[in-house]
Amino acid sequence: MRLLVQLVAVGLVAFGGSALVGAMQWNVPLTLAFGLATAALSLFVYAWVVRRTERRAPDEVALKGAGPAFGRGLLIGLGMFGAVILNIALLGGYEVRGLGSVPGALAIAGFTAAAVVVEELIFRAILFRIVEQRFGTWISLALSGVLFGAAHLFNPHATLWTATAIAIEAGFMLAAAYAATRTLWVPIGVHFGWNFAQGGIFGTSVSGTEAPQGLLDGVTSGPLLLSGGEFGPEASAYSVLAGVIVTVAFLWLARRRGTVVRRVPAATLAG
């Protein structure tokens, strides 16, 4: 019931906010403003509903230490995509044709903020965290990662391969980031850095979604496993490889810190 109530509460805000952001049709100040407002309101509603349903302070979204945690995640996300696009470019799959648009990048930042915060709340703060309490880290990581990939099957140009790539490079990796740090701000930072780097900096498609030009006028080409095709670089084998490497690093950190949760025996739950 906790999972259901929290999903409904955050989902209602997400649906309304996403509808408003989409209705702005990439108007720069409005997309930026409504995107940031949706992110902030979603966090507020999540914190409120957790206090109501779990009778505890939602430390995973606490403002104390949020800035440094988000910053660390942001650098990881930017670095990951920077490495991916560099490898694609070295093989001729990405080309910069010139400068793009600063206003376009700002609009993408607002859109990205709303999408990232909502997705992290639903898939990591609610789904992963609550399932983990019952079944442990490994089962929860697998389940939430697969569902995260499956949710992207509805995106433009999506296929079974693109959903699988998203599950591996993002679903598993972002859950591992939360498991290692126990704060949502790190996966939010990683997710935002990764998505914004794609559209807001390098001007590529983000999960099949078209957007205004980012800071660079970039174009991808070549085979699907190299450039990601119409879905964007997230469907590239390089993105999957980067996600696997960072996932392993976060899981190693989680084991070292002792934050991996084991499955709770049924007898314990019954007692």
Image (tube, rainbow, N blue to C red):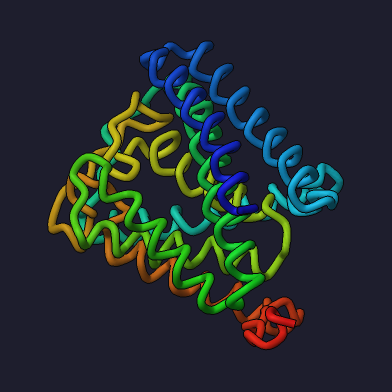
| Viewer-side residue, 112 vs 265 | 265
| Residue 254 percent coordinates (x, y) | 68, 77
Q: Is residue 191 left or right of residue 268?
A: left
Q: Is residue 169 left or right of residue 227?
A: right
| Viewer-side residue, 120 vs 213 | 120
Task: Please name the residue shown 23% across and 46% down the image.
Answer: 231
**Residue 67 visible at all:** no
| Residue 265 percent coordinates (x, y) | 65, 87
**Residue 26 visible at all:** yes
Task: Please name the residue shown 44% across and 59% down the image.
Answer: 170
Q: Is residue 60 left or right of residue 9?
A: right
Residue 187 versus residue 216 in the image, above or below: below
Examine the image and state in which quarter residue 236 appears. Answer: bottom left
Task: Please name the residue shown 54% across and 79% down the image.
Answer: 138
Task: Please name the residue shown 45% across and 68% down the image.
Answer: 143
* Quarter of the C terminus within the rendering: bottom right
Q: Is residue 106 left or right of residue 41?
A: left
Examine the image and state in which quarter residue 136 appears. Answer: bottom right
Residue 152 versus residue 34 in the image, above or below: below
| Residue 14 percent coordinates (x, y) | 51, 32
| Viewer-side residue, 231 vs 163 | 163
Exactly how many numbered labels are in the figure?
Answer: 0
| Residue 245 percent coordinates (x, y) | 48, 74
| Viewer-side residue, 245 vs 258 | 258
